[in-house]
Structures are given as C-alpha cells and as structure tokens.
Image (tube, rainbow, N blue to C red):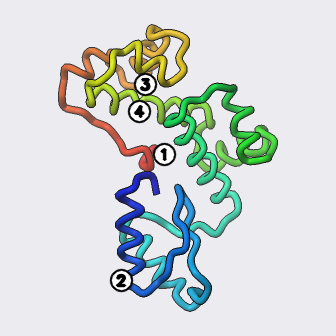
C-alpha cells in the first residue's frame, strides 16, 4: 500500500469480510488472531484491489526496500543510499542489492532514480515549487543535475513536461 486511500479501501473491505486488521503500514498488514482460516479471503481481497500476498522472504526484502525508498523520497535522504538501506534493513547492502537486482531486473539506484523522476513529475503537476526547490527537496546537488537526469529518463526537459499538460505519470507502486 502506497497511499492512505489504498489503506482505507483495504481496511473497509476487510471489515466487510469480518477480518480484523490490527495494524496496517506501508507494505504490511497485521491481522488479529483467528484469521488463519480466512487466508483465501484475505488473498482474494488483496488481489481485487491490485495487491498480492507475499510469502517469499526475498519478496519481503524487496517490499521493504521499496518502502524505505519511498520514505527516503518523502522525508529527504540525508545520507548515502546504501548506508541508509543497510541501516534500515540491518543487512549488508551488497546482499539486498543482489536480491533486488535479481528479482526486479534493475539496480536499487536505478529504481530510486525512477521513483524520484515520478516525484518530480508530481511536483511539476502541483506547480507549487520551482525546479530548484524540487531539486533541493530531492537532495540533488543542483537543479541542472536534476534537469539532466529528468531529460535522460523522460526524453524531455522539465519545462517541456510542464507545458505539455498531457502527463504520463505512473503511481509509485507501479514502477517496475
């Protein structure tokens, strides 16, 4: 779950099905005791809403990586990405990097850049910040660095993107 709306929809569907949710966080749901016999219904509700049940440990690691990367974008990343993830996950970066690359087909760094570009698109659409403010918020050293990266990923400048008004954004949970 990436947004509050997703959480709300799932909570409502689980409540309708008589399934008690104790806690719901980004990528995690903790159900009350006694839901063992309702696993199929839980799986069904998740699938109906575009989510899936993850039981594989490597999949759980990938979900956690994505969760922490989203947090880093929202809260600002003030340290090296590999250090940040290693600390958050309490694992060596080389281990989580290999798992992520093998499952997702791209590096964590490339995925993080794609997330940031979607955030840039969102900020451009909101039209509340200058390009320099967006670059600063996403911890770029300069707005020109962000501009070059944006053009390399999207094929257009940020100004062109703002002017076309025919935005092709993907939700953050749909990247890769």
Query: For the point 26% across and 30% down, which residue is it?
Result: 125
Disc with the residue nearer the chain's start (1 vs 2): 2
The alpha-carbon separation of the residues under discs 2 and 4 comes to 34 Å
Dot 2 alpha-carbon crowd within 10 angstroms: few under 14, some 14 to 19, many 20 or more = few
Compared across the picture, whether 133 is left or right of 54 comes to left
Dot 3 alpha-carbon crowd within 10 angstroms: few under 14, some 14 to 19, many 20 or more = few
The alpha-carbon separation of the residues under discs 3 and 4 comes to 13 Å
Using the image, determine if residue 30 lies above or below residue 96. Answer: below
Task: Give the residue pinned by disc 2.
Answer: 16
Helix, strand or loop status at disc 1: loop
Residue found at the far right of this picture: 92
- Residues at marks 3 and 2 touching, judged by CB atoms closer than 8 Å: no
Task: Give the residue pinned by disc 4.
Answer: 119
Q: Which is more toward the observer, 4 or 104? A: 4
- Residues at marks 1 and 4 touching, judged by CB atoms closer than 8 Å: no
Residue 83 picture location, percent across and down: 74, 32
Q: Which is more toward the observer, 137 or 1? A: 137
């Amino acid at each position: 779950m990436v947004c509050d709306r997703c959480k709300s929809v799932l909570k409502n569907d689980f409540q309708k099905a008589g399934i008690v949710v104790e806690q719901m966080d980004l990528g995690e749901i903790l159900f009350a005791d006694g839901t063992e016999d309702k696993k199929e219904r839980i799986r069904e509700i998740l699938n109906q809403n575009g989510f899936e049940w993850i039981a594989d440990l490597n999949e759980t690691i990938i979900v956690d990586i994505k969760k922490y990367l989203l947090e880093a974008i929202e809260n600002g990343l003030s340290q090296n990405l590999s250090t940040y993830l290693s600390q958050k996950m309490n694992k060596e970066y080389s281990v989580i990097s290999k798992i992520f690359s093998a499952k997702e087909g791209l590096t964590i760094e490339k995925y993080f850049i794609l997330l940031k570009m979607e955030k840039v698109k969102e900020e451009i659409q909101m039209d509340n910040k200058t390009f320099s403010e967006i670059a600063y918020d996403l911890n770029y050293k300069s707005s020109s660095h962000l501009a070059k990266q944006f053009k390399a990923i999207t094929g257009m400048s940020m100004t062109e993107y703002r002017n076309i008004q025919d935005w092709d954004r993907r939700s953050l949970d749909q990247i890769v």
